[in-house]
Image: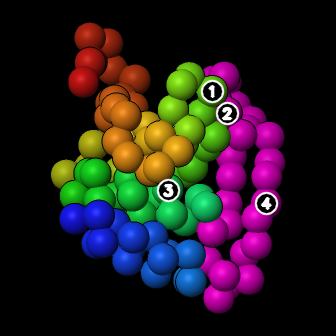
Amino acid sequence: MDIKRRYVATAAAVVALGAGTGVALATAGGEDDAGEQVSGPDAAKAKAAALEVTGGGTANSVERDDDGAAWEVEVTRPDGETVDVSLDGALDRVAVESDSEEAGDSD
């Protein structure tokens, strides 16, 4: 399973480099107190790891997390639910939390 994760992460990094994205940091805007939005090879690796955790879907955004995990990736699962996947520095799962704004929603 570790080899599969590395393969996916490597493939994602190659795609990101091939597209010439490079590493770009931007301050996250909006109403929440999110970390920094990131892109580039490291963000591509975090997206690939998060999609492996959720069993697929669409990675919407990647942030450097300031709540103890190294990365936070917002993913829309194949069933339509949006979750935040927290990953550590080794891109291992720390937590998966619902990103829904509905009252009483906890995951």
Q: Position of residue 21 (x, y in %)?
A: 72, 75
In the rendered image, the quadrant that contains the N terminus is bottom left
User: Type of residue at label 3?
Assistant: Ala
Q: Is residue 78 above or below residue 31?
A: below
Q: Relative to 57, is 30 on the left or the right?
A: right
Between marks 3 and 2, how big is the CA–CA gap?
14 Å
Sequence-wise, the earlier of marks 3 and 2 is 2
Q: Relative to 61, is 5 on the left or the right?
A: left
User: Type of residue at label 1?
Assistant: Asp
Q: Which residue is mark 2?
A: 35
Q: Which residue is mark 3?
A: 46
User: Type of residue at label 2?
Assistant: Gly
Q: Is residue 74 above or below residue 55?
A: above
Magenta stretch in the rendered image = 16-41
Image point (56%, 75%), residue name: 13
Specify the label residue 66 is tagged with.
Answer: 1
Q: Which residue is mark 4?
A: 24
- Classify 10 Å Cα crowding around label 1: few (below 14), some (14-19), many (20 and above): few
Residue 24 on the magenta span: yes
Sequence-wise, the earlier of marks 4 and 1 is 4
Sequence-wise, the earlier of marks 1 and 2 is 2
Q: Relative to 49, is 60 on the left or the right?
A: right
Labels 1 & 2 near each other (Cβ < 8 A): yes
Which of label 1 and label 2 is nearer to you? 1
Task: Look at the numbered disc 1 and give the secondary structure of its residue.
Answer: loop
In the rendered image, the quadrant that contains the C terminus is top left
Q: Position of residue 86 (x, y in %)?
A: 43, 37
